[in-house]
Amino acid sequence: MINEIAPNIFNISLLRRGNIKSEEQVLCYKNGKVLMKTIEDKFIIPQKNELGEWVSEGILLGEIDGEKCFIAEGKEEVPQGFDYVGMRDIRRHPDKLSKWITAVGFHLYNWINDNKFCGRCGNSMELKNDERALKCTSCKNIIFPKLSPAIIVAITKGDKLLLAKNKLHPGSFYSLIAGYVEAGETIEETVKREVMEEVGIDVKNISYYKSQPWPFSSSLMLGFFAEYDGNKPIKVDGIELSHADWFDANNLPEIPNRDSVAGEMIRIFRDKNKRQSL
Ligand SMILES: [Zn+2]
């Protein structure tokens, strides 16, 4: 998965402002994109010394194998040899470590940028100096990073897996049923509700698999396996999904890659149920 970067270690630090030193890495975000050093079709996170006076101070994001990494804002003009790269392109980045750090930085940058002012009194917010949070300079209201828990569920019926096609995804791309946890709901209740809402069936034997932070949408994905229960036919909601069906392990449509927990769970199903050809 995209967040599994071992043997590298990425420690998110307390967010604090500071001057960026020569060898330290700099993440500059703008309009959903991030500044990267571009060499042919490769992207590399820039270092302060490569950007010179274009950037000076930033917010410390954390340490990558002991090296500091900052979120910063540069000047208006894009420096030569660099380009702003969309997060969708970043997801195709071959270097897992750079990809992951850029994604985590994107999550925290969006949160800081969306909370410049206090929602309670309207005064400006500042970085809290003893925990990873923002604090209002006037009424002391504290805002923690936005994190939206969401479930994702692999539903099996015998040796078949339920996959659904989202209206927003073009072509023949299918994935698992997913949805956000509502206030006042357990994650198991979310699984049952989302499955019923989106495909109109009941599930049983819900078992937790693993979680995955998904910084692109400020989410924490909670992966589950579950079994089809009862005899209701699939009834697609028509709002989020355009089609859903039971798929055989030997005949899967286009599925998510290994970056996501969904991609990993579908492959677990496939490896368990695939018939060897004679
Ligand atoms: Zn306030």
Image (cartoon, rainbow, N blue to C red):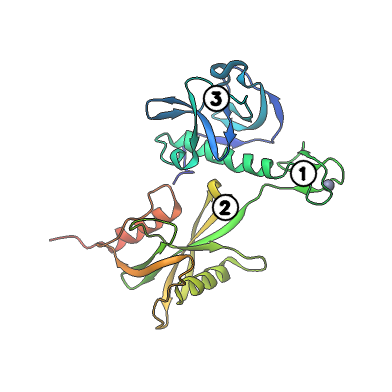
Task: Please give the residue where the numbered disc 1 appears in the rendered image.
Answer: 117
Q: Can residue 7 be seen from the camera position used here? A: no
In the displayed structure, would residue 194 be above or below residue 106?
Answer: below
- The answer to whether 119 appears left or right of 255 in the picture is right
The residue sitting at 71% across, 48% down in the picture is 144
For the C terminus, which image quadrant? Answer: bottom left
Question: In front of the other: label 3 or label 1?
Answer: 3
Task: Please give the residue where the numbered disc 3 appears in the rendered image.
Answer: 78
Q: Can residue 76 be seen from the camera position used here? A: yes
For disc 1, the neighbor class at 10 Å (few under 14, some 14 to 19, many from 20) is: some
Question: In front of the other: label 2 or label 1?
Answer: 1
Q: Which amino acid does label 3 sit on?
A: Val
Residue 22 pos. (x, y %) = 59, 17
Residue 24 pos. (x, y %) = 58, 22
Earlier-in-chain disc, 3 versus 2: 3
Secondary structure of the residue carrying tag 3 is loop
Q: Which amino acid does label 1 sit on?
A: Phe
The residue sitting at 37% across, 26% down in the picture is 40
Task: Please give the residue where the numbered disc 2 appears in the rendered image.
Answer: 219
When asked about the image quadrant of residue 56, the answer is top right
For disc 2, the neighbor class at 10 Å (few under 14, some 14 to 19, many from 20) is: some
In the displayed structure, would residue 186 be above or below residue 66?
Answer: below
In the displayed structure, would residue 191 be above or below residue 121?
Answer: below
Q: What residue type is labelled 2?
A: Ser
Q: How far apart are marks 3 and 2 (CA)?
A: 30 Å
Residue 169 pos. (x, y %) = 41, 56
